[in-house]
Image (cartoon, rainbow, N blue to C red):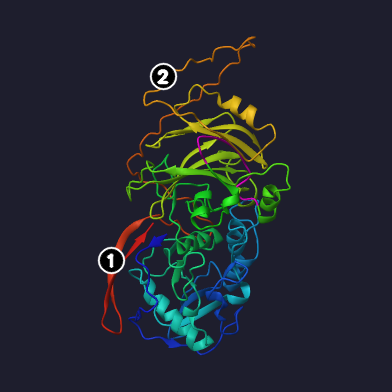
Amino acid sequence: LPFFPLFPPFLKVESPSFILYTMQARQSSFDQQPSKRMQEPLSNGVDERGILSIRLVYRTAAGDTEGEPSYCDEACIEDSTWETHAIQGGEWLGSLSDIVSRSSLGKFKFARNLSATLTAVLDAPMPRVGCPLFGAAADADRYVEAVFGIDPRSFVHREYVLPLEFGGCKFGGAATVGCAKPFKAKPGACVSFIRDALPTTRAHEFGHNLGLRHSGDVADDVSYGDESAVMGSHRGWRSYSAAHRDQLGWLPAAIVTDVVDISVVRLMPLDSDARDVEARTSLTSNAREAIAARWACDGCYNQETAMGGKIYVSFRGGIGYDTDLPSKAKDKVVVQAWLHPKGGSLLYAKLAAGESHEVQDTNEPKVIFVCSILPKVAATVVILPAYRTDLSAQQLCDDSIRDEPSTITVSLPSLPPTPPILPSTPPPPTPPPPPSPSLPLPQPTLSPPSPPIQSTPPEPPPLIPPLPLSAPPVTGTFQTPGFMRIRFTLNFD
C-alpha cells in the first residue's frame, strides 16, 4: 500500500506524548553502527543494502505491556527476511531477501551484516485513535538511537512493525513510493509500516520503495487484482512480474525480445534463476531463449494517468516463486500492460497452448498466439499484426521453431494505404502441392474496464483479523524546526 508524497528525511515529527526510554538494550542481530556500504552499490554491479526492522512495544507506567506486535517477534522477522519457508499452504520455500535476489538475477541484495532487527519499548500510551504513523516512527527512531547507539536514518529502508491495536489503522502494510530506486539509494529515504506477519506483505511494500505500483487485472478493474504478482493482492508467494522487473532494470537486454513485424519467440519461465538464465541464453547453448517479449503500446489506456506504455508477454512456468500459482495462471503465457511508472501494470490475458489474445494498440493491434507449452520448461509464441489474417499462426510456429532459436523476425513488404483483399488460400504453385489448411486467428475484442466495484479482500492468515483493502485518504501538515510547513497525503489501499 503506497502513500504520497515521500516522507522527507529532514522532517522532524514530534510525538504528542513524552517518551521515557527504558535504558536497557534488548538482544539484536546487529551490534554496531552500520557502515556506509549500505548506501552504495558494490563495485561488482550489485545493489546491496541493509534494512532496519523495528518492533514497537508500548508499556504503561506500571510496567505492563499495553500493545505489541505479538503476531511476529524478532525471531519471526529475522526468519521472514533470511530463512526460506513455505506460506499459505504452498510448496515454495521463500524469504524476503531471496525473492528480490532471484527476481533481479542477483543484481539486488539485502545484506544480513548490514541489517538489524530491534525492539523499541516505549513507556507511553499507545495511540487508540487515528493512525499517527510518523509520530510512532519518530518515537521508535529516538529510542533506537538512545538505547542502541544506531542512527536509523543511516539505513535506506526502515520498517516499523506495529501492534494490531495501534490507533485506528486498517491496512496490512504501507510504504513510501519510489524513495530509493535501484542504484539510487539514499540513506533515510524509505519507510514502511507493517501490521502483518507474512513476508509477501513486506515484499509488496518494499516494491513500493523501489518505485513499483500495483499489479491490476483488466477482468475486475481492481488496482491490485492481479493474483499472479507480488504487487497484486494475493498473500502467498508470487514473483515480481516481467513488466516490473524490466522497470527496475532487472532484465538484461539479451533476454528480452523487442517485437518487430512478425516475431516467433521461445520463452523460458519468468522466475528462472540466474544460473539457468545464463545457461539457456549463452552463445554456446543449442537454443537461445528470452524471458519476455515486449513492444511499445501508446494506445494502452490507463484511466488514472491517461497514458500508455508497453506490452509484455512472459511464460509463468510454475517454478521458483511461481510454484504456487493457481492452475489458471501456472504454465500459462501471460500478456500484461505496463501502463506507465505512475500507473502500475494490468493483466490482459492468461493463455494456454492454442489460445490467442489481441492487444488493441491504436498504432497497430497485435495478436499473440501460443504455439506450444512445455510445462516448467518453455513456451513458444508468435506475435504478429492483427490485420495479417492471410497468415497461419500455427504454420509460422511449425516453420520457424524447428531449430528453436529465440526469435525469428519476418520482414513485411510495404503495403498500400488500402491493402487489397487477400485470398484465404494462396494460388497453388506448379506443380500444385496438396493445399494446407489455414488456422484462423481468433480476434477477441478487449472490452473497456468496467466501473470500479467493491471487492472482497483475500482472507488473512490466522492471528490477523480481516483488514479492508481501502480507506479514505488522510491529509495533514507537518512543520519542520525551521517553521516550514509541509503538506502530505496518505493513500491507503
Q: Earlier in the sequence, mark 2 or mark 1?
A: 2
Q: Which residue is mark 2?
A: 420
Tag nearer the camera, 2 or 1: 2
On screen, residue 306 versus residue 100, left or right, reads left
Give the amino acid at mark 1: Thr
Secondary structure state at the residue bearing disc 2: loop
> How many numbered marks have been drawn onto this rendered protein structure?
2
On screen, residue 130 versus residue 139, left or right, reads left
Q: Which residue is mark 1?
A: 475
| Residue 71 in view, yes or no | yes
Which residues are the magenta region? Answer: 259-272
Give the amino acid at mark 2: Pro
Query: What x and y, as percent, mark residue 166?
Result: 41, 70
The residue carrying pointer 2 sits among few (fewer than 14), some (14 to 19) or many (20 or more) residues within 10 Å by Cα, namely: few
Q: Is residue 21 magenta?
A: no
Whether 435 is drawn above or below 219: the answer is: above
Whether 342 is drawn above or below 145: the answer is: above
On screen, residue 412 versus residue 42, left or right, reads left
